[in-house]
Amino acid sequence: MKFRSPIILIAVVSLVAGATVVVLPARAGQLKEFTAEQIAETVIIANGSRPLLSQIRRNGVERGRQTRTAQDGHTEEAHYELRFVRGEKAEKDKVRVDNKTPQAEYSLINSEGRIFGIINGSPFIPRADATADFISQQAHSIDALLRYKENESKLASAGKDKHQGIDVYVIDLTDKTNRKTRYFVSAKTFRVLWLEYEETPPRTGSPVKYSKRFYDYRVAQGTLVPYRTVLSEDGKQTMETRISTVTYGVKMEDSLFQNPEAASSGNP
């Protein structure tokens, strides 16, 4: 039997020791049949509810560090600061990421779909792979699922599964540009445990299978945030992101996201 309302889907939603626990009206050891929309709506409630997410996460600042692993095993650590202002839909968002590596300091900015960079105070046009990676980080994310209605994305159920003893619901999201992301959602907590997607990087002929796994969920201003994310490409870990601080409701000047009138062709 399928329920018509996601509200009926939830028996109890509570905060226990800082962790969201969702109790469903299902028999022990048995996963109920729910629509993709019902699962997504429960994920939204478990993460703080749609009104709270839209109000609290309208803008914010996130700081942390990223560790990238090259094909030869060499690792490089960078510190980052992400600032964002959300629009009514993802294409109206403004996102700025300031990166500091041992070699350089530079910024990548997405201002309502216009992507550019700044390095040493001068504007530049990012490389195609850097631009593609920047877009993917936003398009294939937990936020894309939490905002599926606003972004007019389509959802479809991909059934149920069990991974390492954990029951999960699997749902597919397709956005308006036909980008597809598969989400694996805990049947117990309704947190997104990991997601998967495929993309063909610029100047390559073969698609790459990516996965993001989310760990260390914490409560930030009444909403859930995974403080550790691990990105893998074709099964090999390529980047780990650890958040140090995140603050929502921070006022930001429009100048942070303004596109320079002229851009050079330099690369970071």
Image (cartoon, grey):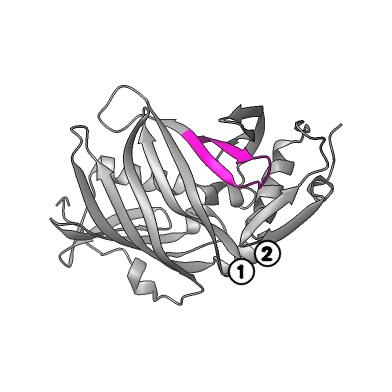
Taking the spot 82% from the left edge, 50% from the top edge, the residue there is 11
Q: Is mark 2 on a helix, strand or loop?
A: helix
Q: Which mark is residue 51?
A: 2
Mark 2 closeness class: few <14, some 14–19, many ≥20 residues within 10 Å: few
Left or right relative to 196: residue 233: left
Q: Is residue 206 magenta?
A: no
Residue 36 visible to the viewer: yes
Q: Say the numbered circle drawn on residue 100.
A: none
Q: Where is residue 67 in the image (x, y as percent from the top left)?
A: 28, 49
Q: In which quarter of the image is the N terminus?
A: top right
Q: Which residue position is annotated with label 1?
A: 55
Give me the C-alpha separation between circle 2 and circle 1. 6 Å
Q: Position of residue 50 (x, y in %)?
A: 67, 59
Q: Give the residue displayed 69% in from the left and 52% down from the top.
A: 21
x and y percentages locating residue 245 in the rendered image:
41, 67
Mark 2 touching mark 1, by CB under 8 A?
A: yes
- Magenta-highlighted residues: 178-196
**Kind of element beneath mark 1:** helix
**Can residue 179 be seen by looking at this rendering?**
no
| 185 inside magenta stretch | yes
